[in-house]
Image (tube, rainbow, N blue to C red):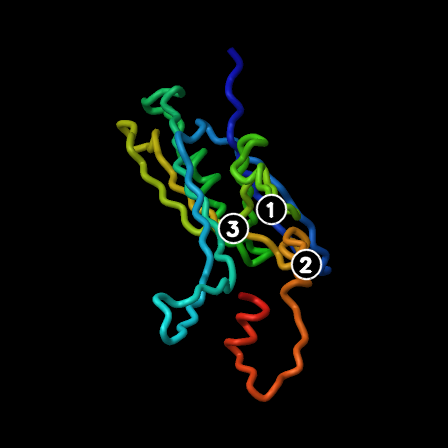
Amino acid sequence: MANPELAVIIARWSRVDPKGKVTETERSFPVQFNPKEFSLEKGVQLGEIAIPGLDAPLQQFVRGQAEKLSVELFFDTTEDGTGVDATSVTSLTDQIYQLAKVESSSHAPPIVTFCWNRHFPGDSLSLGGGQLRNSFVGVVESVRQQFTLFSSEGVPLRATVNLVLREYRTLDQQLDELKLSSPDKSHAHTLAERDTLSGLAHSYYR
């Protein structure tokens, strides 16, 4: 039976040379073991419009909030032995930890992509536009390392890494993906003497 496809983390650094030229460098870090689970959290910010006499305030969409991906990764190097010549698990975990560190040229951590297979959550959205996806692109918000097994020499041999990514998309990417088009939301109106803002909002936007 073939091995299941391993999840992979791809880091992209932007480096600036002394002449100001920007180059991008990518590195892939396949996980040692596929995670047992991961979670995605997406929220929106709403503004409440209080109108006297109503049972509840009206809810108005203000903007979306950055999505978060949280995943726990497991690493183990005991197959190489647990004695004096044991391999430290940090040879694997440091690859993940460095994704939260500032790169000297770009002055920022890298952009990180977490992908597993083409059926990533969000690959079947019916919203249209360019919002379909088969991976998660973000920046590292936090990395928590827990070392749970050591050799007799104190070398860490087993660890779990809790990684949290915060969604990253540029302005141009978002405008291109959303393809905002709303002629039904833009109107011109000549004000009359008894017009009110709430009355116009009801007439045009219900």
Quarter of the view holding residue 34: top left
What's the amino acid at mark 2? Answer: Ser
The one nearer the camera, 88 or 45, is: 45
The one nearer the camera, 34 or 199, is: 199
State the image coordinates of residue 12 (x, y, percent, origin top left). 60, 45
Give the labeled residue for mark 2. 181
Disc on the earlier residue, 1 or 2 = 1
The one nearer the camera, 87 or 168, is: 168
State the image coordinates of residue 43 (x, y, percent, origin top left). 45, 54
Label 1, label 2: how many angstroms apart (C-alpha)?
13 Å
Label 3, label 1: how many angstroms apart (C-alpha)?
19 Å
State the image coordinates of residue 50 (x, y, percent, origin top left). 40, 73
State the image coordinates of residue 28 (x, y, percent, origin top left). 57, 36
Give the labeled residue for mark 3. 167
Quarter of the view holding residue 73: top left
Disc on the earlier residue, 3 or 1 = 1
What's the amino acid at mark 1? Answer: Leu
Element type at mark 1? loop
The one nearer the camera, 110 or 157, is: 110
Quarter of the view holding residue 22: bottom right
Q: Residues within 10 Å of mark 2 (few under 14, many from 20)?
A: few
The residue at the point 43 percent across, 71 percent down is: 49
Label 2, label 3: how many angstroms apart (C-alpha)?
24 Å
The residue at the point 36 percent across, 20 percent down is: 81
Image height check: is 52 above or below 150?
A: below
Q: Which mark is residue 127?
A: 1
What's the amino acid at mark 3? Answer: Glu
- Label pair 3/1, CB-CB below 8 angstroms: no
Q: Residues within 10 Å of mark 1 (few under 14, many from 20)?
A: few
Element type at mark 2? loop
